[in-house]
Image: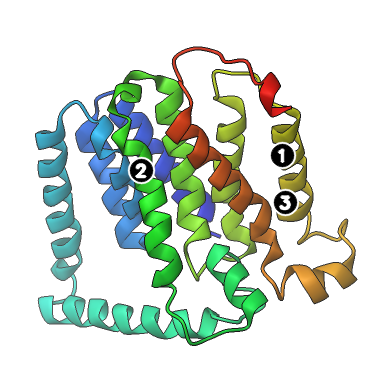
Amino acid sequence: QFNIIIAAIIIASFYCIEKEKDITAACFIMIGTFVKLYGIVGLAFFFFSKHKVKFVAALIGWTVLFFVLPMAITSPEYIIDQYKEWHVSLAGKNMENMFSNMQNQSLLGLVRKISHVSTYSDLWLIVPGVLLFCYPYLRIRQYGNLAFRYAFLASVLMFVVLFSTGSESSTYIIALLGVALWYVTAPWKRSRWDVALMVFAFILTSMSPSDLFPAFIRKNYVQPYALKALPCVLIWFKLVYEMMTKDYSTPQNVSEEK
């Protein structure tokens, strides 16, 4: 499975931007994009870069290099044809994943499989999801807080899984890293509801594919209805709400949430 590498690439791109190594960050983002497309979400950290022009220039440079490099052992026509076929394959796979038991274990699949409706476009969910994801960017004054930037990293790690029809059980190594970051990096004490969400994620998201989880429930409910995604969906919405409302500079009293 390559998913752990994708998670590492996303985290590495964030780390490099934090350390002002924008060229290296751009390299990680483009490697992740060319290998499995998921790496493109590293662009979400663009606004945290202190060298945006250099970052954009590096992105363009690495893109051209990684696109042209395989042509040295093949030909331009072959590489271009491969990308065309890749696009067609992804479109076909998206249709196949729609009601697959093992694929589309995401927010998109959760809604699709519970509703049993195939006629609507996933864009009805993806577009509002992107708007929610982007809304915290408006809180420019929070950019200086490391905890806020960690929250964005956590959001990216969950978003890329929850809004992909290609998400499967093993893909959640990416989302669960985001869940862990959400819990441990907040500059306030977590409430009992947050603890309950973590336990819920551990039981349903992490343990449901294993033999420690009742097979009957897994085969008849968790997989067919993409319930594995549910805890991460709830946590992501909670995270977005926190990013839109909380002050990440100082610890806060959460007694009102208990």
For residue 216, what is the image quadrant? Answer: bottom right
Q: Secondary structure at mark 1?
A: helix
Which x, y percent locates residue 108? Answer: 53, 68
Vertical relation: 183 (above or below) 218: above
Residue 1 visible:
yes
The residue at which mark 2 appears reads as: 135
Earlier in the chain: of badge 3 and badge 1, it is: 1
Marks 3 and 2 close (CB-CB < 8 Å): no
Mark carried by residue 206: 3
The amino acid at mark 1 is: Met
Marks 2 and 1 close (CB-CB < 8 Å): no
Nearer-the-camera pick, 69 or 62: 62
Earlier in the chain: of badge 3 and badge 2, it is: 2
Q: Secondary structure at mark 2?
A: helix
The residue at which mark 1 appears reads as: 198
Earlier in the chain: of badge 2 and badge 1, it is: 2
Rendering colour mode: rainbow
The C terminus is located in which quarter?
A: top right
Marks 3 and 1 close (CB-CB < 8 Å): no
Whole-number angstrom distance, CA of label 3 to CA of label 1: 10 Å
